[in-house]
Image (cartoon, rainbow, N blue to C red):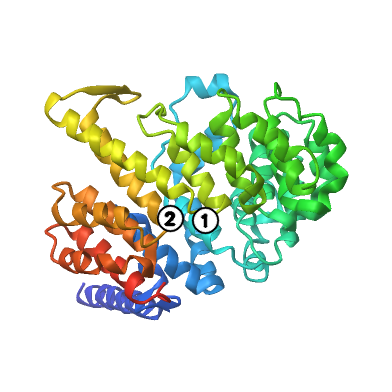
């Protein structure tokens, strides 16, 4: 009995030492600013502070291809160990009638979700990624096959090497699988050129049509062969009309696509979707600036959740013309309107109805004021009205979330927001941890222009 106990103790000790050795020898991966890639990933997926997420995203973008193996290991591990993920994949491929009979898949964000987000932000090279996921792509029956299809859509340089695998995935008899494969093909941009024949065929498949149109547009002038087929969708009554107009303009800037989008902006029923699509064109939509500026000036409505509808227009304008000074006086006027609304309704307690129920108008105006200030800094990082609003919020707003957002907006402005440095330094002593971290991050961005 004594020897048996000694033997058992020896085995336990050996296993313990081996486990410790494994932990100590486990590679921590590349580091950035003193944190390992694993630590940055933990921060990205666990924080409720948007500034922390931005810092982590910056770290992954700075590490680039070095961080890709770690994120692929997260996807492999999560897919292998998560029954919930397996159920979600199965549920997504069931007919709608069966989906209604079964519990919906959980919407909780898994580590895989965050790994994909970071890969899309990094756009790693195919030479680093493909050798690691090719075993997953060996068969549609491989348990990680569809994970690999998702990874292919994140590829940057050399992404065309993943196109044959995406073409194979488009042969699936499941419409959801075909749509997912096309979504990832669409994200490859010009690298998707080898898929041109398949994309033309996919225009006839309702499950892939819209994404195929976008994929063709993202290929650009090399997709001119698709123009005759895209023309059949340029009917304003067609569901994919706006996407087709964008694609036509990307492929042939001298064609009718931009004119059709401008005409759609003048249609009250299509105004916001058309402006959103013009934003996707970026600087190529500069000829539409006047009509979009007029829409921004006139728009005073709200979306279904109570947010100002003009945010869509301001975001599109920033994509089209990032330093456009004509936007600034329009936004300043909207800022004054929001401040007046806040003063009028602070005492009356008036409310507005949204998809989430009644919202006090004073609270709505306060949110508008913050959003307008943030948008103003997009066009001029040193804009005085915006800096005044954000520093005031940072110093005195009772809500930590508002102070956190103000610091985040100043962070995004970068060196141009130097006038906010005193307020940010004061916020380093804020009673809320998230605000302190957001202020520190903003200071790094403002005081060290090259900081990531």
- The answer to whether residue 30 is above or below residue 378 is below
Residue 176: quarter of image: top right
- Badge 2 crowding class, 10 Å Cα cut-off, few under 14, some 14 to 19, many 20 or more, is many
Looking at the image, residue 438 sits to the left or right of residue 186; the answer is left
Disc marking residue 322: 1
Q: Nearer the viewer, residue 281 or 209?
A: 281
> For the residue labelled by badge 1, is the local secondary structure a helix, a strand or a loop?
loop
Give the x, y percent position of residue 288. Answer: 63, 42
> For the residue labelled by badge 2, is the local secondary structure a helix, a strand or a loop?
helix
Q: Nearer the viewer, residue 240 or 128?
A: 240
- The answer to whether residue 216 is above or below residue 435 is above
Looking at the image, residue 408 sits to the left or right of residue 243; the answer is left
Looking at the image, residue 207 sits to the left or right of residue 105; the answer is right
Looking at the image, residue 230 sits to the left or right of residue 67; the answer is right
Of the two numbered discs 2 and 1 on the same chain, state the one appearing first in sequence. Answer: 1
Q: Are marks 2 and 1 in contact (CB under 8 Å)?
A: yes
Give the x, y percent position of residue 106. Answer: 41, 36
């Amino acid at each position: 009995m004594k020897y048996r106990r000694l033997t058992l103790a020896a085995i336990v000790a050996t296993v313990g030492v081996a486990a410790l050795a494994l932990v100590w020898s486990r590679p921590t991966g590349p580091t950035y600013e003193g944190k390992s890639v694993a630590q940055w990933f933990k921060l990205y997926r666990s924080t409720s502070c948007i500034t922390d997420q931005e810092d982590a995203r910056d770290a992954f973008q700075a590490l680039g291809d070095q961080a890709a193996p770690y994120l692929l290991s997260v996807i492999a591990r999560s897919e292998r160990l998560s029954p919930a993920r397996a159920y979600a994949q199965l549920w997504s491929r069931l007919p709608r009638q069966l989906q209604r009979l079964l519990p919906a898949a959980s919407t909780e964000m898994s580590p895989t979700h965050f790994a994909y987000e970071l890969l899309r932000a990094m756009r790693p090279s195919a030479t680093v990624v493909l050798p690691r996921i090719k075993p997953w792509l060996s068969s549609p029956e491989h348990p990680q096959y569809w994970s690999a299809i998702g990874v292919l859509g994140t590829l940057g340089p050399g992404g065309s090497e993943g196109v044959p695998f995406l073409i194979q995935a488009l042969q699936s008899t499941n419409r959801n699988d075909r749509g997912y494969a096309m979504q990832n093909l669409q994200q490859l941009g010009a690298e998707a050129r080898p898929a041109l024949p398949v994309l033309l065929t996919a225009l006839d498949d309702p499950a892939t049509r819209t994404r195929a149109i976008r994929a063709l547009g993202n290929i650009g002038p090399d997709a001119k062969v698709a123009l005759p087929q895209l023309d059949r969708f340029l009917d304003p009554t067609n569901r994919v009309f706006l996407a087709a107009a964008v694609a036509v303009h990307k492929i042939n800037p001298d064609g009718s696509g931009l004119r059709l989008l401008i005409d759609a902006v003048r249609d009250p029923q299509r105004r916001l979707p058309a402006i959103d699509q013009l934003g996707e064109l970026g600087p190529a939509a500069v000829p539409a600036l006047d009509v979009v500026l007029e829409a921004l000036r006139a728009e005073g409505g709200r979306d279904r959740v109570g947010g100002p509808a003009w945010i869509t227009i301001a975001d599109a304008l920033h994509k089209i013309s990032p330093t456009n000074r004509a936007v600034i006086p329009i936004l300043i006027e909207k800022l004054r309107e929001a401040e007046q609304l806040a003063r009028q309704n602070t005492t009356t307690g008036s409310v507005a109805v949204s998809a989430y129920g009644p919202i006090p108008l004073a609270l709505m105006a306060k949110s508008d004021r913050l959003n307008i200030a943030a948008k103003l800094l997009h066009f001029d990082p040193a804009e005085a009205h915006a800096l005044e609003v954000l520093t005031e919020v940072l110093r005195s707003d009772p809500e930590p979330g508002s102070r956190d957002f103000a610091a985040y907006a100043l962070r995004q402005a970068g060196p141009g927001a130097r006038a906010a440095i005193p307020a940010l330094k004061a916020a380093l002593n804020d009673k809320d941890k998230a605000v302190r971290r957001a202020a520190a991050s903003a200071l790094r961005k403002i005081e060290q222009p090259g900081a990531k």
